Amino acid sequence: MTRRSPLRALAALLATTALGAALAGGPPAAAADPGPSATAATGATAAARESGVGPRLTSFPAALLLSNLLPDLDPPGANDWTCRPSAAHPRPVVLVHGTVENRYDNWAQMAPDLAAAGYCVFALDYGSYTRTPYRGLSDIAASAQELSAYVDRVLAATGAAEVDLVGHSQGGMMPRYYLRFLGGADKVDQLIGLSSSNYGTTFFGVLPLVAALPGGEGLVGLAAPAIPQQRQGSDFLARLNQGGDTVPGVRYTVIQTLFDNVVTPYRNAFLKDPGVTNILLQSRCPLDQSDHLSISYSPNVVRLVKNRLDPSTARSLCVYSPPLL
């Protein structure tokens, strides 16, 4: 299997970041041909503004676009506080977004897919200083406190004894702080992480370079503490992983793509303790080309998540799924 070059992967990430920055101040200027993703997102804007619930979208760029226009959207199928878990699926599923993401752009496809399968689905935003679409930025320990309060709210509303957590990137790692230090292990049956930053990232050598510059990491941390905390070898991750990276009573799964262009090296996503299920996506589906930002939109990954949530319904799926660019 041929890996895509780091430069191409980095270009994909920078293109997405540029799109978000361009949209942060308001709707984009009209274009002669916005393309199918932009058309789908903008065509859904009026209805979403009325309901507060966004449409089901099947690509991260389209969901990013719409969440920039309407930063407080719920993903479809999520946050129905009247939902009561069934006997078949007794645990609500809480979706936890990644860094510089939000509950809508991360989960606009997976949330409705899980809801259609009969789960009570909930998705939170966390780690934000302002009402922008860019969240997951603040101190990770503080974000874990937000997750703790949210899980308590879900349990109280649904009457369930435990939840299952599904998280992307920081959202697959941050809950481990909640489980280890905030009593979350008593309230969570399993954590499923997608491209989780469990052992941090070098981001192709950029983050160590920033850390080596006088005051460089401190300046980044002033704006977004969660970014230097996810550097490979950071004090935060050293504390989180010290003495083992799991806690008793919780089941752990990590699903990672060979083409991760944010968590680098890609194996830093995997946990090391015995009993963890680490899945390299391409070992299950060589056709899947998902990268870091597109992994939660892969139908193969959605299927793997469903298989882990309820093994009695497990089946194989392998279809082509593209990278972000």
Image (tube, rainbow, N blue to C red):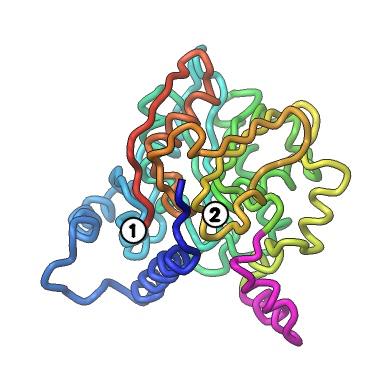
Query: Is the residue marked by circle 1 packed among few (<14), some (14-19), or many (20+) residues within 10 Å?
Result: many
- Judge left or right: residue 96 versus residue 67: right
Q: Residue furthest right?
A: 243
Q: Which residue is mark 1?
A: 61
Q: Quadrant of residue 98?
A: bottom right
Task: Give above or below for 274 relative to 212.
Answer: above
Query: Is the residue marked by circle 2 packed among few (<14), some (14-19), or many (20+) residues within 10 Å?
Result: many
Residue 82 place in picture, x, y as percent: 45, 29
Q: Amino acid at mark 2?
A: Gly
* Nearest the eye: 319 or 117: 319
Q: Residue furthest bottom?
A: 214
Q: Which residue is mark 2?
A: 98
- Judge left or right: residue 304 versus residue 221: left
Residue drawn where x is 26% and y is 73% of the image: 28
Can see residue 148?
no
Task: Give above or below for 151 relative to 34.
Answer: above
Magenta stretch in the rendered image: 201-223
The disc, 2 or 1, on the residue closer to the chain's N-terminal end is 1
